[in-house]
Image: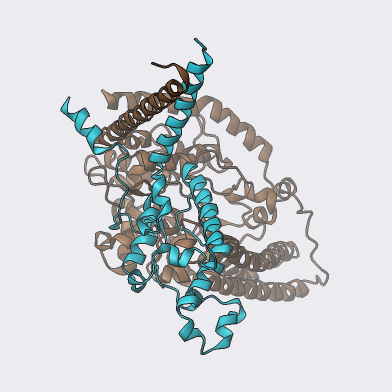
Amino acid sequence: MDRKKIILPILAGIIFGFGFFILYVFNFASYASNEPETCMNCHVMDTQYASWSRSSHQKVANCIDCHLPHDNFAHKLYFKAMDGMRHSAIFLTRTEPEAIMIKKAGEVVVQENCIHCHSDVVAQNANMLQGVDNKKCWDCHRFTPHGRERSLASVPNAEVPYIDSATPTWLKKIIEKK
Amino acid sequence: MFKGKSGSWILFIFTLVIVFFMGLLANSIMERRTEAVIMKKAIVDLGEWETRNEVWGESYPEQHETYLKMEGGEIEDILEENPYVSVLFAGYGFAKDYNKPRGHIHAIEDTRNTLRTGAPTEEKGSPMPATCWTCKSPDVPRMMEELAVDGKDGVAEFYRGDGGKWDNLGSQIINPIGCGDCHDPETMALTITRPALKEGYKALTGKDITEATHQEMRSLVCAQCHVEYYFDKHLDGQKKGAPYLVFPWSEGITADALEQHLNKRGADGTGHKDWIHAVSKTRMYKAQHPGWELWQLGPHGMQGVSCADCHMPYESRGGMKYSSHHVTSPLDYIDKTCQVCHRQPEEELRKAVKDRQASIKKLTVKAEELLVRAHFETKAAMEEGATDAELEDIRTLIRESQWRWDFSVASHGASFHAPLQVSNLLADCIDKAGKARLELSKVLAKHGFLGEVELPDLSTKAKVQKVIGLNAEKLKQEKENFLKTMAPKWDEEAKKRHESWDK
């Protein structure tokens, strides 16, 4: 019998099996969603989730409504992918800062989204739409919506959704029965 | 079964499922291992006087791991960097050797190594009293307790060095500043172990220090050492004659208030003396490191931001929150310190600190230049025949001026902690040194000297030390000899003691 026909499928099976497992542990499917819970996969943004979930914005906007561009679908997807890869790299290398600071590109996106929803208010003043002296909305609205707690360590016991164990319940049951 | 195309597919999918399932099992095993790490965290019984930081570290690994990061700080020689400092401290220990402070973990090592503690031998003791150990080790409160026998005041006995000098307690004071200095071994609550702070706090506030709030304690534990202090040999009762450690806070915590306290001390109540200046023969006060005093006068102190908030910031690992015990400059991790409250970018925050430091540095350079000249001009006046009576007011101005310079620089962080107060102090310092020099020119003129008093070559540490009559080479050789002969004996004795604790 041709040995290639045995070795190749086995090798491919190992690679794909392990690949799927990694994706599963990463909770990969969740990244297709728009749910704020997805942003809690890494337990790094607890402070941001906790402050948002008790803010006035909680009822009307979730994470990606403010933090991803909505001008066109391709741009949104590209931005999400780039952010996601950077965050994964930071998470895996344990280099997350204690107090997270928004990046320049993120600032532009959030400012646009503020104006997008609040256009009725800002339209009264053309300067605001242009951005007064490069001021951002949150230079004055400092604690909207994330409050003043900035460090991850500030809210060690925040009530936030935590990701489930990667070991499925049925497997746990089998293991514990023995 | 595995024949043909469909056979390959079956084999592929079969392997894929097996590998995926093995991954799940591996994951389950890893979760169990994490459980073990969390659950097996032993709490070691510390007893009342465990002074070895590594033993505490077994129960508190995060705190101990961060504490160990203080290891290996660089030694920076202040006298080499700024030789004028050696002139200003002429006749005093700090003219011999003065390095920038390193981490707590080096406290014992650096105290043994500095030329200021001298080179004790079996015949000759150290020039410094045992009081100099007070801030260096959790072994200190242990010894204070051990020396409190036969109705003696254990604290005063400690400062007396149990009948000797600094070296007499050398084999007892072994473990560097650590856990037991600030924590209760049973409850881990913050606690004050140094009597000088308890007494100073009472004198300052009228309150018992146990009434302090937790947030106040997060600075007060630091104030056990990072404060202005002096040794008072003129206290009453059992303390009489001992170089008793006192924080001079009876009048308040400003430089003026502390000076008033010192002015009332001494043998006859006419003023304390830290040393007589070798060049100008002025009775001097040494400002030690009034960090706690200046911090609370500045913007962060006024807002109640504690020492620990910036120098021991909270960190998180997984769901765990703990204080970093890597006590260092907050600029080393701005994301855990400044940015917890301030949302400016890192470079902006760093610049805000550096700008304050640079603008105050300009003033200290001016102050040092004036003070160095005043000391040498006083010396010149003495050589021209000026009497002590003629120089009395001038020396008072020099003492007051240098006290304010020293108060501004000695705590190292003051130009950021309280920039406005430090600028004011340096303005007073420059004013007083200017007045002293004006009076000096009159005295010199009266004695027929009209020219400019030439300064000797003060361009390097070595040249300055020669001018002020210090034989640094000899001191260094003696020190090396001490480190080779006596210090290892201390360590040997300590090792035996530690082993006896483990039995």
- Quadrant containing the C terminus of chain B is top left
Which color scheme does this rendered protein use?
by chain
Q: Quadrant of residue B87?
A: bottom right
**Image coordinates for residue A86, horizontal then vertical, percent:** 53, 50
- At 44% from the left and 28% from the top, the residue drawn is B490
Relative to B335, say whether B389 is above or below. below
Q: Quadrant of residue B377?
A: bottom right
Q: Residue furthest right?
A: B451
For this rendering, which residue is in front, B295 or B209? Answer: B295
Chain B colour is brown
Q: Quadrant of residue B139?
A: top left
Note the chain letter of the cyan one: A
Relative to B224, say whether A128 is above or below. below
**Image coordinates for residue B12, horizontal then vertical, percent:** 44, 25
- At 60% from the left and 81% from the top, the residue drawn is A130
For this rendering, which residue is in front, B152 or A83? Answer: A83
